[in-house]
Image (spheres, rainbow, N blue to C red):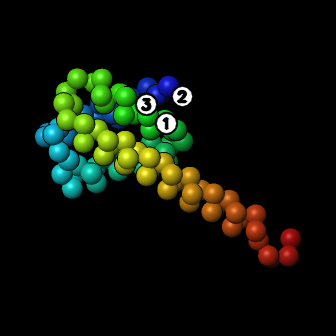
């Protein structure tokens, strides 16, 4: 699944936001999670491998560890969102209210 323009815009925001591209600070991690949460809450879906590939080819990221960390964060946020969405659907369908 190719990355949408909205996702690419957010990846560019991450690149601009992170000052030290050799390591992510805790603040960077929190901001990156917030960006991915915003994307998935807005209905965006993305392939984690495509996220990793984008950062590898972007040009300003020379160290692999932060790229892997960002890909892992994107995966974590997307999986967590899908699980909570699934639970909300189940709780609505599993109503024992007599209807």
* Residue 28 in picture, x, y percent from top left: 23, 49
Residue drawn at 43 percent across, 30 percent down: 50
Where is residue 19, by image quadrant? top left
Callout 1 touching callout 3 (CB < 8 Å)? yes
The relative height of residue 23 versus residue 30 in the rendered view (above or below) is above
For label 3, count other residues whose C-alpha is less than 10 Å away and answer few (under 14), some (14-19) or many (20+): some
Q: Please, which residue is most extreme toward the right here? A: 99
Residue drawn at 15 percent across, 40 percent down: 22
| Secondary structure of residue under mark 2 | loop
Residue drawn at 30 percent across, 46 percent down: 69
Which of pointers 2 and 3 lies earlier in the amino acid sequence? Answer: 2
What residue sits right under mark 2 in the picture?
1
In the picture, the quarter occupied by the C terminus is bottom right
Q: Please, which residue is most extreme toward the left here? A: 20
Which of pointers 1 and 2 lies earlier in the amino acid sequence? Answer: 2
Residue drawn at 19 percent across, 35 percent down: 63
Callout 2 touching callout 3 (CB < 8 Å)? yes
What residue sits right under mark 3 in the picture?
50
**In the rendered view, does 73 fall on the left or right side of 66?**
right
* Residue 6 in picture, x, y percent from top left: 43, 31
| Secondary structure of residue under mark 1 | loop
What residue sits right under mark 1 in the picture?
46
Residue 29 in view (yes/no): yes
The relative height of residue 68 versus residue 26 in the rendered view (above or below) is above
């Amino acid at each position: 699944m190719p990355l949408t323009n909205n996702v690419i815009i957010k990846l560019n925001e991450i690149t601009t936001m992170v000052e030290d591209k050799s390591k992510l600070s805790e603040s960077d991690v929190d901001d990156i999670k917030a960006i991915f949460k915003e994307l998935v809450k807005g209905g965006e879906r993305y392939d984690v491998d495509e996220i990793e590939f984008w950062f590898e080819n972007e040009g300003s990221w020379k160290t692999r560890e932060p790229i892997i960390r960002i890909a892992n964060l994107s995966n974590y946020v997307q999986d967590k969102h899908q699980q909570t969405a699934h639970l909300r659907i189940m709780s609505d369908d599993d109503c024992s209210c007599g209807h």
